[in-house]
Image (tube, coloured by chain):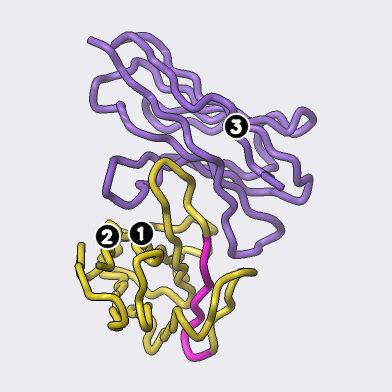
Chain colours: A yellow, B purple
Amino acid sequence: GAVVSQHPSWVICKSGTSVKIECRSLDFQATTMFWYRQFPKQSLMLMATSNEGSKATYEQGVEKDKFLINHASLTLSTLTVTSAHPEDSSFYICSARDAGRGQETQYFGPGTRLLVL
Amino acid sequence: DQQVKQNSPSLSVQEGRISILNCDYTNSMFDYFLWYKKYPAEGPTFLISISSIKDKNEDGRFTVFLNKSAKHLSLHIVPSQPGDSAVYFCAASAGGAQKLVFGQGTRLTINP
């Protein structure tokens, strides 16, 4: 149980284009999902908290207009990197909390590697 | 301000011996702690957690110890196996808050 998937697993795009990344909880409902990014050899940095049916909460320094988050259902959250630039190249990882278990444990997806040329 | 710190960037242990990974935190409001294991280009995998009302939690080869007065937790893996080679992150959350704060990670290498 507690499986989280991400799609795509990797993407290469041209500078200026937008990229959408999907995060799904496969066997549980997630009222809250989280989006992280990780640079090489660094820790996971929380970008935003995605709440089903409401606006996402962004961490300080994260541009909400650049990283659009939509949490349309209890099993799906999407992150759209708009007008991507090379500095947005990174490893993006989502996680989800199992609302049914009432725990604080977050289960992570496999990550999406984004390369912007 | 790094609220969760893993001061050892790497650790090398012989197969079959005990691996001890350490983590320190500064925020006294943290009341839930987790350990994750991560392979390159993959998402972290949850290993074990502990609530601040406990000082020890065990799951198979993995045991987490929490010393609240020292604001220190550790993960013990025994016996260590080659498949345990990965980067280990500790994380903490406060007061039911949903955010997790991660340490920098420790790369564990198990030598045959």
Give the x, y percent position of residue A104.
Answer: 54, 58
The residue labelled by disc 3 is B23
Most prominent secondary structure in the magenta stretch? Answer: strand
Name the quadrant containing residue A35: bottom left
Instruction: Please state which amino acid type lies under the numbered disc 3.
Output: Cys
Nearer to us in this view, B11 or A108: B11
Pointer 1 and pointer 2 on the same chain: yes
The numbered mark at residue A113 is 2
Give the x, y percent position of residue B15.
Answer: 29, 11
The residue labelled by disc 1 is A90
Alpha carbon distance from label 1 to label 2: 6 Å
Give the x, y percent position of residue A36.
Answer: 45, 62
Name the quadrant containing residue A83: bottom left
Q: Chain of mark 3?
A: B
Give the x, y percent position of residue A48.
Answer: 53, 71
Instruction: Please state which amino acid type lies under the numbered disc 2.
Output: Arg
Crowding near pointer 1: few (<14 within 10 Å), some, many (20+)?
Answer: some
Nearer to us in this view, B63 or A54: A54
Pointer 3 and pointer 2 on the same chain: no
Q: Is residue B71 visible?
A: yes
A54 vs A30: above or below: below
- Give the magenta-colored segment's residue range: A46-54
Of the 4 image quadrants, the one containing the N terminus of chain A is: bottom left
Residue drawn at x 41%, y 22% as measured from the top left: B77
